[in-house]
């Protein structure tokens, strides 16, 4: 058995050296078992520390992620923009083209990234049950003794976004009288009258007072939709066209302690989202308060990494507030591992009498669920 084990280990590490880019780690903690144990254990890759065989995994630390959605707006003035107030009472219509940004939304959440100060080594021992251990692509512990699903790493097809509706050409609805007008001002006046006629026709249909009423609701809807299309197209000849392109910006902050009213990012109408030290933008402030939901024990002189067992996080809770200096854009509680502690699952749980299935939250490193299967 010893010779078989040594040959098996040499084969595994030769395979690993040929495939260094493997991202998923499913390891076995205890290969010195019977032949049936080998059949149940899948080893994709392993590492060594001295003469010990095992695997290195990490616990996550928290980063506060801000997902900022902003619209880049391209404004093109209408053909009759300077007559918008006179004929349609549309105020503040600019006659100059412009490109500017507008803030659409801000979402705040906590995300987990590998913590270099919380890295652990699982030693492969004999005379123990051989549990399967799954890690994320970043090496964060995800589960123990949970069957690995190949589908979880399969690429998902991204659905193609449907094409947007093409805007109608307003000139397709202009009458001969409008097109034959001898001046731009006269043409604008006649287009405005046509818009008012369309509005009157819609009101007559909705009130049931039209001369030629539709026979059913479906026909009425078609007629109303066509009139709305004409009105919208002609109105844009006065109000202009605004084309919006949505963009998403991501800002991440790593909290090591509480803070109040720190600049998270800045927003500029001309440039969009800019860095927090760029004075061209208006600042947005973030505050983080430790709610002290986890009691921090006193140090007992033992180093955390010297303790046995599987380490996991007990994250604390923090109150996160985001403002623009005047009003709140976000306020809510988020898990923050830096405000919590690290605990350990005792090695005695993983014995021959039962199989323990453990689920971790890869975002926080906290325990989600522990199941026992009697052997």
Image (cartoon, rainbow, N blue to C red):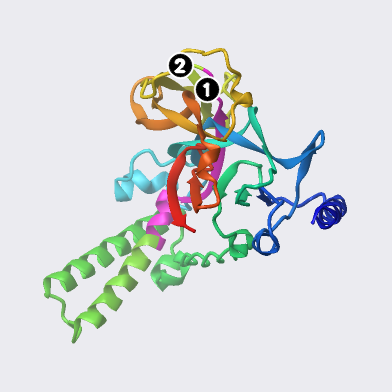
Horizontal side of 37 relative to 353 (left or right) equals right
Q: How far across and how far down the image is residue 187, in percent?
A: 41, 59
Q: Give the residue number, with chain letter if any, for mark 2.
A: 258
Distance from the alpha carbon under mark 1 to that under mark 2: 7 Å
Is 96 rendered above or below residue 300?
below
Which quarter of the rendering shows the N terminus? bottom right
Q: Is 114 or 272 nearer to us in this picture?
A: 114
Is 295 rendered above or below residue 174?
above
Q: Is 296 or 302 nearer to us in this picture?
A: 302
Other-residue count near label 1 (Cα within 10 Å), few / some / many at <14 / 14–19 / ≥20: some
Instruction: Name which quarter of the figure residue 235 lies in.
Output: bottom left
The secondary element bearing badge 1 is classed as: loop
The secondary element bearing badge 2 is classed as: loop
Q: Give the residue number, with chain letter if any, for mark 1.
A: 255
Q: Give the residue displayed 52% in from the left and 13% down from the top.
A: 300
User: What segment is highlighted magenta in the picture?
Assistant: 233-256
């Amino acid at each position: 058995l010893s010779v078989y084990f040594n040959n098996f280990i040499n084969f595994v590490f030769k395979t690993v050296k040929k495939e260094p880019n493997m991202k998923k780690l499913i390891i076995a903690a205890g290969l010195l078992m019977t032949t049936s144990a080998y059949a149940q254990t899948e080893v994709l890759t392993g590492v060594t520390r001295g003469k010990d065989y095992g695997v290195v995994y990490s616990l996550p630390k928290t980063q506060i992620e801000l997902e900022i959605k902003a619209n880049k707006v391209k404004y093109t003035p209408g053909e009759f923009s300077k007559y918008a107030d006179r004929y349609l009472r549309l105020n503040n219509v600019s006659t100059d083209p412009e490109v500017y940004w507008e803030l659409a939304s801000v979402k705040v959440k906590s995300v987990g990234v590998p913590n270099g100060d919380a890295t652990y080594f699982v030693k492969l021992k004999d005379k123990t049950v051989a549990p399967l251990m799954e890690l994320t692509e970043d090496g964060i512990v995800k589960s123990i003794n949970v069957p690995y699903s190949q589908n979880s790493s399969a690429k998902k097809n991204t659905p193609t976004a449907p094409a947007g509706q093409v805007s109608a050409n307003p000139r397709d609805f202009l009458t001969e009288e409008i097109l034959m007008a001898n001046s731009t001002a006269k043409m604008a006046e006649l287009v405005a009258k046509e818009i008012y006629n369309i509005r009157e026709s819609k009101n007559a249909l909705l009130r049931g007072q039209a001369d030629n009423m539709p026979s059913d609701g479906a026909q009425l809807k078609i007629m109303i939709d066509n009139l709305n299309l004409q009105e919208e197209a002609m109105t844009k000849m006065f109000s202009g066209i605004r084309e919006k392109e949505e963009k998403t910006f991501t800002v991440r902050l790593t909290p090591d302690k509480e803070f109040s009213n720190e600049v998270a990012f800045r927003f500029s109408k001309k440039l969009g989202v800019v860095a927090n030290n760029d004075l061209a933008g208006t600042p947005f402030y973030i505050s983080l308060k430790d709610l002290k939901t986890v009691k921090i024990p006193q140090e007992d002189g033992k180093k955390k990494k010297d303790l046995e067992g599987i380490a996991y996080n007990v994250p604390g809770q923090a109150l996160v507030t985001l403002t623009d200096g005047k009003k709140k854009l976000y306020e809510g509680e988020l898990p923050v591992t830096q405000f919590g502690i690290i605990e350990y699952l005792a090695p005695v749980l993983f014995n021959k009498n039962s199989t323990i299935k453990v689920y971790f939250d890869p975002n926080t490193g906290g325990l989600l669920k522990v199941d026992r299967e009697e052997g």
